[in-house]
Amino acid sequence: MSELQQKIQQTLELQRQFFQSGKTRDISFRLQQLRSLRQAVMDYEDKITEALYQDLHKSRFESYATEIGFVLEEISLMIRNLRRWARPQRRPTPLTAFSGHSYILHEPYGNVLIISPWNYPFQLLFAPLVGAIAAGNTAVLKSSPYSANTSEVMAEIIEKTFDPQYIALFQGHRDVNQALLSEPFDFIFFTGSPNTGRVVMNYASRNLTPVVLELGGKSPTIVDQDANLKLAAKSIVFGKLTNAGQTCIAPDYLFVHHRVKDELLKLIVQYIEEFYGHDQRQTEHYPRIINKQNVERLAQYLQCGQVYYGGGYDVEDRYFQPTILTDVNTDCDVMKYEIFGPILPVMEFEDIDEVINFVVSRPKPLAFYYFTRSRRKARYVLSRTTSGGASINDTLMHFVNPRIPFGGVGNSGMGRYHGWYSFEAFSNKRSVYHKNLWIDLPVRYPPANKWKEKIVKILLK
């Protein structure tokens, strides 16, 4: 057995013992841990911000809005509501069992594993952790090696805030992932690519471990001829260029009605330069690509169409300019794979059903964006398509509301989280029937007779 595997097994055994002690089932204990986590995040805000700048060139504003502030809001929501959410939930009981009452207990799974990606390295590790703590679990965390500076800061936060028998963080590459996934966790929460999600699910199946998979895919954006074009352009630039397009719910490709295509593209360019300047490389507000390999990968996509705007890049600086591609070949790689970068392929359409047929013929996306002034059109398009989530006349914003669930469907994932849905995701929903002792109807017991059959038929109609 390797030293790594031995350390993982020792950590897991300590966490199993700690969980079996029953301490994490105490709501007051969970609230105390959430408050400790909140204080630690606030204490480390400057270090987290600096690490995110080093890894992804994120500005202070973007780091707080998309990572630190998001996690703090999630913690605060959980603290305010946890006692109410954790109460047994009464449910109606049928006449066949009227001598008792029924309820649901949300109990912790036990020892959970959370694996996070590099694109939002802080948010996508700590937001699920909030749900795991609130539900009463112990947790093993695995951060991404590609966002190494943020991983180091997160490891420091976890080490100083929690005992490893309760919460522990491992760093490293795929060998660490494989070693962790080989262990029999009670629940796995994974955020990453669909291909890696399949690997995680394969490992989980060996122990029949329940999973939440937050994956990705090619999220379509559609601008109809009656759309508010200024709003559409502004929202598309915001959604596409946040984190330089390295967002699982970024608008991946754009369909625009041919009558408004030229005007929309001019407005998109206008807002790119309004937000980030004429030379986006010079502003501190425009992020970098995570590594040189991904810059080279994105550069290959430039061959899939005509560069309408942008196209510049610097491998050494990890810089890739906001880019619009027109005359796109739909059989090219840019339309086959999730772009995960600041390239926007643009296609035009005449009839909305053309776009609907295109979208539904491909794997189900994580997000879906449609711009129109017509509620009727919006309802029609939503009824004919599917996705993990959707925003009408905006991008990304369905993700930021902690009171609605976030997650994928099909190729883009399974399971939901944020707010109440995080608490639910990390909880086993235990159904309980509690029989009263004052009566016990004989109708259900053998031997059967005619009057018992009549009563059963009446009760079970």
Image: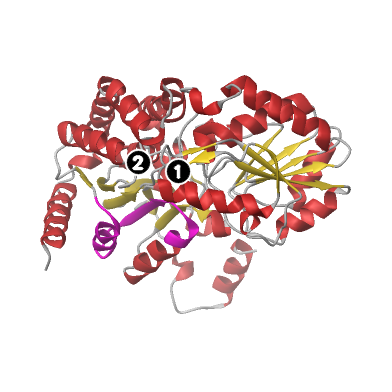
Residue 300: x %, y % from top left: 57, 54
Which mark sits nearer the N-terminus, 1 or 2? 2
Q: Amino acid at mark 1?
A: Val
> What residue lies at 16% left-to-right and 56% top-to-bottom?
8
Instruction: Find disc 1 in the rendering and name its residue.
Output: 315
User: Residue 457 or 61: which is nearer the viewer?
Assistant: 61
Q: SS of the residue at dot 2? A: helix
Residue 393: x %, y % from top left: 72, 32
> What residue lies at 46% left-to-right and 38% top-to-bottom?
418
- Please, is residue 53 above or below residue 203 in the view? above
User: Residue 376 or 141: which is nearer the viewer?
Assistant: 141
Q: Which class describes the residues within 10 Å of circle 2: few (<14), some (14-19), or many (20+)?
A: many
Instruction: Find disc 2 in the rendering and name its residue.
Output: 125
**Residue 208 seen in render:** no
How is the rendered protein coloured?
secondary structure
Residue 454: x %, y % from top left: 61, 70
> What residue lies at 46% left-to-right and 41% top-to-bottom?
421
Q: Which residues are magenta?
A: 172-197
Q: Place residue 249 in its image quadrant.
A: top right
Q: Amino acid at mark 2?
A: Leu
Residue 382: x %, y % from top left: 74, 46
- Please, is residue 127 above or below residue 416 in the view? above
User: Residue 160 or 231: which is nearer the viewer?
Assistant: 231
Magenta-drawn stretch contains 189: yes
